[in-house]
Amino acid sequence: MQLTLKDELAFARVTVSYRGARVDIDDVLVDTGSATTILAARAVAPIGIVPELDDTLYTIRGVGGTEAVFTRRVDRLQVEQRAIPDFEIEVGAMNYGFDINGILGMDFLTRAGAIINLRDLDLGFAQPPDQLTT
């Protein structure tokens, strides 16, 4: 997949499937410095991923500061043809002062066997291990 470079940062498009609905999300930062994947609440709300009364809020910390998030297990998270089923994401406001709809973290990148080629701005994948779907 061709990555998009914005302000010297690499962005990708992800697809989230949840309870029979699906949404494509652009402007997701590919971030090897983030342990987990977080998506903007405004980007996943159209497919029914919203806070529920029994959700636990967590505080995450990063270079941009702290943020309250909740987690949700989605049917699958996909980049191009590489999908990981039953994947847990974090959901938060993501008001960082610039347009960003999510962060694709190391939890997805390592499980998916991502290969990031920054010279060509390409995100590819190694041959899939048996537990992954393609």
Image (spheres, rainbow, N blue to C red):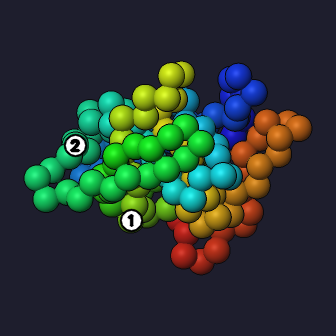
Q: Residue at x 49, y 29 (%)?
A: 96
Q: Position of residue 134 (x, y in %)?
A: 57, 60
Q: Could you say where residue 36 lies in the image, as x and y percent from the top left? A: 52, 57
**In the displayed structure, would residue 113 be above or below residue 123?**
below
Outermost residue, front side: 65
In front of the other: 50 or 79: 50
Kind of element beneath mark 1: strand
The picture quadrant where one finds residue 74 is bottom left
Q: Give the foreground label among 2 and 1.
A: 2
Residue 21 coordinates in the image, percent (x, y)? 28, 44
User: Do labels 2 and 1 touch, CB within 8 Å?
Assistant: no
Give neighbour class at mark 1: few <14, some 14-19, many 20+ (Cα, 10 Å).
some
- Gap in Å between the C-alphas at discs 2 and 1? 17 Å
Camera-side residue: 40 or 85? 40
Element carrying mark 2: loop
Q: Is residue 13 above or below residue 98?
A: below
Residue furthest to the left in view is 53
Q: Can the viewer see residue 23 in this picture?
A: no
Q: Determine which of the numbered discs, if any, sits on residue 86 in the image.
A: 1
> What's the residue at 59%, 42% (across, down)?
63
Whole-percent x, y for residue 88 in the image: 40, 61
Q: Is residue 56 left or right of residue 92?
A: left
Q: Write the residue at 69% across / 40% down.
A: 1
Tag 2: amino acid: Val
Identified at 73% across, 50% down, the residue is 124
User: The disc labelled 1 sits on which kind of residue?
Assistant: Asp
Image position of 62 (left or right of 92): right
Q: Where is mark 2, residue-wise?
A: 50
Would residue 119 appear left or right of 74 to someone viewing this image? Answer: right
